[in-house]
Image (cartoon, rainbow, N blue to C red):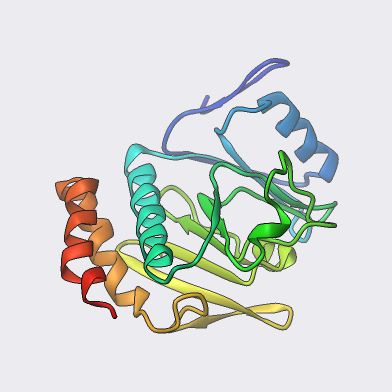
Amino acid sequence: MFITVNQNTLTLTPGSEIILQYQTWDDYENLLEIRQEKPLPKIYFHAKTNTIRLMSPLPSHGNRVDILRDLVKSLLGKQGKDWHCFDPITLKHFKQAGVEPDTCFYIDHRDAILGKEKLDLSVDPPPDLAIEVDFTSLTDIEAYQTLKIPELWIYRQSILKIYRLVGENYQESSTSGIFANVNVKEILPKYVELAWNQGSSVALRQFEQEYLNKIN
């Protein structure tokens, strides 16, 4: 078995994904309760498909998440913007969807969530940016649409895709609304893969020397 579930634990073999069909919101909440405050496995729910997805990432997944988070922080710092970053976090729209992005950023809406232990998207704003690395599984974009997160990045196989919310739906974009003057699709994958092959500190140092320090 890839998954083990009892009253006290919920475990999933690293690198595995399990999709449970014909699930309800209560089923989803029960799994979250069993997992308690542990970050893994990541648990997603989408009412439109009545599915729960459980995923436990590999180390290569975590490394790419970590460097993407650091690169975003460097860009925000260069622009003089404040932010608040969450990882891990569970974001829910009651009875509609629940997602757990690999990392997410509050930027424009940072002040609204500072000091809060838990977020309730029925009253709190969604993150300005959510990032997923599709290494073990594929991101359910429609679930993110339900939560109305303005910008979603999905990184897979050295390609960064940007989705921006237009009305009720995401549209794939060649540019980021957060970093309008930075070609993140072209620039960031280079340093993400460099971090995996040569180390995160090397990648960040080269990013600062080769790109960040040249921005006015």
Report the side of 64 relative to 14 (left or right). Answer: left
> In the figure, 216 relative to 76: above or below?
below
The x, y position of residue 153, in whole percent, is: 48, 66
At horizontal 67% and vertical 49% (from top left) the residue drawn is: 114
Q: Splitting the image into 4 quarters, where does residue 88 fall?
A: top right
Q: Nearer the viewer, residue 112 or 193?
A: 112
> In the figure, 191 relative to 9: above or below?
below
Q: Nearer the viewer, residue 80 or 120?
A: 80
> In the figure, 96 relative to 42: above or below?
below
The x, y position of residue 205, in whole percent, is: 19, 55
The x, y position of residue 12, in whole percent, is: 52, 29
At horizontal 41% and vertical 58% (from top left) the residue drawn is: 73
Count of marks, rendered view? 0
At horizontal 48% and vertical 74% (from top left) the residue drawn is: 162
At horizontal 73% and vertical 41% (from top left) the residue drawn is: 118
The x, y position of residue 116, in whole percent, is: 72, 43
> In the figure, 215 relative to 129: above or below?
below
Q: Splitting the image into 4 quarters, where does residue 143 fall?
A: bottom right
Q: Nearer the viewer, residue 31 or 167?
A: 167
Report the side of 135 relative to 95 (left or right). Answer: left
- Quadrant into which the C terminus falls: bottom left
